Image (cartoon, grey):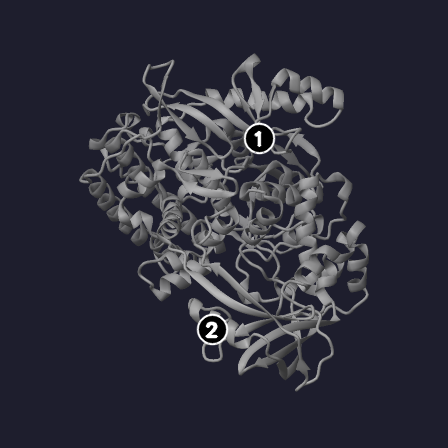
Amino acid sequence: MKSLVIAEKPSVARDIARVLKCNKNINGAIEGSQYIVTWGLGHLITLADPEDYDKKYKDWNMEDLPMMPEKFKLEIIKQTAKQFQAVKEQIHRKEVNQIIIATDAGREGELVARLILERAGNHKPLKRLWISSVTDKAIREGFMNLKNGAEYQNLYDAAMCRAEADWLVGINATRALTCKYNAQLSCGRVQTPTLAIIAKREEEIKNFVPKPYYGLNVKIGNILFTWQDRKTKNVRTFQKDQILSLLKNLKGKSAVIVNIKKTPKKSYAPLLYDLTELQREANKRFNFSAKETLNLMQRLYENHKVLTYPRTDSRYLTSDIVPTIKERLKACGVGPYQKLAGKLVTQPMKESPSYVNNQKVSDHHAIIPTEQHVQLGHMTAEEKKIYDLVVRRFLSVLYPPYEYEETKVTIEIEKEIFSATGRTVKNLGWKAVYEKEEQEEEETEGVQELPEWKEQELLKPIELILTEGKTTPPAHFNEATLLSAMENPTVYMETKDKTMEKTLGETGGLGTVATRADIIEKLFSSFLLEKRGKDIYLTSKAKQLLELVPQDLRKPELTADWEMKLSKIARGNLKRTIFMKDIRGYANQLIEEIKTGEGQFRHDNLTNTKCPVCGKRMLMVKGKNSEMLICQDRACAHREVVSRTSNARCPVCHKKLELRGKEENQIFVCSCGYKEKLQAFKERRKKEGAGISKKDIQNYLNKQKKEAKQPVNQAFAEALAKLNLQGNDLRKE
């Protein structure tokens, strides 16, 4: 008899098959003497379209809402139907006596496998492989410690409840809004609160009134002392008269040192990376989008096998990982990390609460290197950047703290207090892990090198310097700060309910580490967000949507409420039937609210360009990296790409060039005024022998043509795609 192993993706299946000594390729699987390894392609099964319940749902009509299936149907995803049939065939083989679920260890991974098994009609016993990396060692150890599949039934129930709830709320509300206002409007429990958070920030910026403030510095030699109010301890004031009076009274006076305080201090390395923190860091340092970072991490995890599971929300390790640390250090200790890792390998490895905490790890520990030997030469430049961030962070938590002595010198001039701070490094500690430039930048920020003074020493001459500025509004969101807001949206909650705040904090806020990148991308592709430089702005469409959507869907509290209940289901403390009954009632309430709404939707981006398909005027919309014309009629599928930001650089100012026009008339245009026809660009780059290749250009043009042909509104198909990213954790692989 044999065991059938179901992995989430082909790459992971191949790794498992190799470890299990399966080497015979069969239809959609790899077979060995004891095991057969097959795979999904991400999700093979999804919840059925509305029209699968009733043909009338193929047309979007308000009178048909809400749609409330008594029992949800499952349908095979057409694009991956062939692989599903192959998996089903293996499930029902007579010699297969048990199924081993080896999909990603988490709520959505459980859903991927269970939906396949349910749709295929499986009745064979289940085992569960639960591992955080796909190295040979991790796979071997995982198969030696297989779990009983029944232990994860509640986790599956929670995943299924989330999927069905998002279907009932998201699809019904999206159809209701679209029908009511004859515009492609979508909403969901994650997408809409995210837009509301951005709207709140834009409102704060709009209403902000700058206030002038003033301060006073004293320069003695090369050292700058800062004034501090004796009572308030503030270093600046909004009272200009106060500072001008000080400036007048202190002119020509001497300073006396009243206190020199030396304090030994330590700073510890930042916590290890979870996915969101890594996405934030990569956006700040390299301007990578959240989606780019996740894709790079996925390749480093699946293909190179040098980093652990990326979709984690933990920044700590569990105790059982500590004995493997030295092996991981040997594996990653190559190239620029050789000396840094080498110092640690020879030392005893102690478990430290700064990076080991079993209570703070749920499904997966923090992202760290695996025991797989690293070949940096096989990585792309972008992959190396992400790998470098993770490895240095991993090494830094193993190094001792950064130790320094802080010296604070306080002087007095006519009873007014001024102070300056200096720092002497005693032990570089974890900062030795980082490049010299980064060390210097952090160490010298706001810190001066102070002379060896003594208390009561008289200092003169003094130079008084008036400082002034204005208070600044909050910054617009960029991808890094938006990720932070989604991860911790409690500040945007209206109820200030402590239990809900705690739940949002524990469950990762809006969306999950696995879906936030896709949610942001979808908001751009739905023309609800646009970028100006690095800053993110709401479009007119998004602002109007927030006015029209039911108030509940704008609040993070909805996700908090759901997650509290889903966590109870996963722990076995709440029946899924009770949760789903509440959701059905809530969906009915939402649709009634939309039906009776009195708002209006107005396209304010209409152009005079007529749609070549239906003749109606087209809308000009801005995507994340492109401008498009799309037909205003949601029933018409026509769109045209007007311009797209390319990776080609301007030879004058080196900014990214925009590619405009069609076919042979395409032209590169730069904001500095530079223009160049595509053909001339190709010839110039060919002569230079550098830059973008012919293959790159052709791939880019093919992609542009393909996107131009894609319909904007594919009725339910698109609504479901939107839904998967609004509040649904289903991942597109």
Q: CA distance from mark 1 to mark 2?
A: 48 Å
Which numbered circle lies on residue 672? Answer: 1
Q: Secondary structure at mark 2?
A: helix
Examine the rendered structure and indicate whether residue 103 appears above or below residue 706.
below
Asked where in the image residue 90 lies, by quadrant, the reply is top right
Q: Amino acid at mark 1?
A: Cys
Q: Could you tell me if residue 568 is visible in this image?
A: no
Q: Amino acid at mark 2?
A: Ser
Q: Secondary structure at mark 1?
A: loop
Q: Could you tell me if residue 602 is visible in this image?
A: yes
Q: Quadrant of the C terminus?
A: top right
Neighbour tally class for label 2: few under 14, some 14-19, many 20 plus, Cα within 10 Å: few
Which numbered circle lies on residue 215? Answer: none
Residue pictured at 45% horizontal, 48% vertical: 476
Closest to the observer, 561 or 276: 276
Which residue position is annotated with label 2?
245
> Disc 1 or 2, which lies upstream in sequence?
2
Q: From the viewer's perspective, is the residue at label 1 or at label 2 nearer?
A: 2
Asked where in the image residue 260 lies, by quadrant, the reply is bottom right
Q: Is residue 82 left or right of residue 572?
A: right
Residue pictured at 45% horizontal, 69% vertical: 237
Residue 589's x, y, as percent? 22, 46
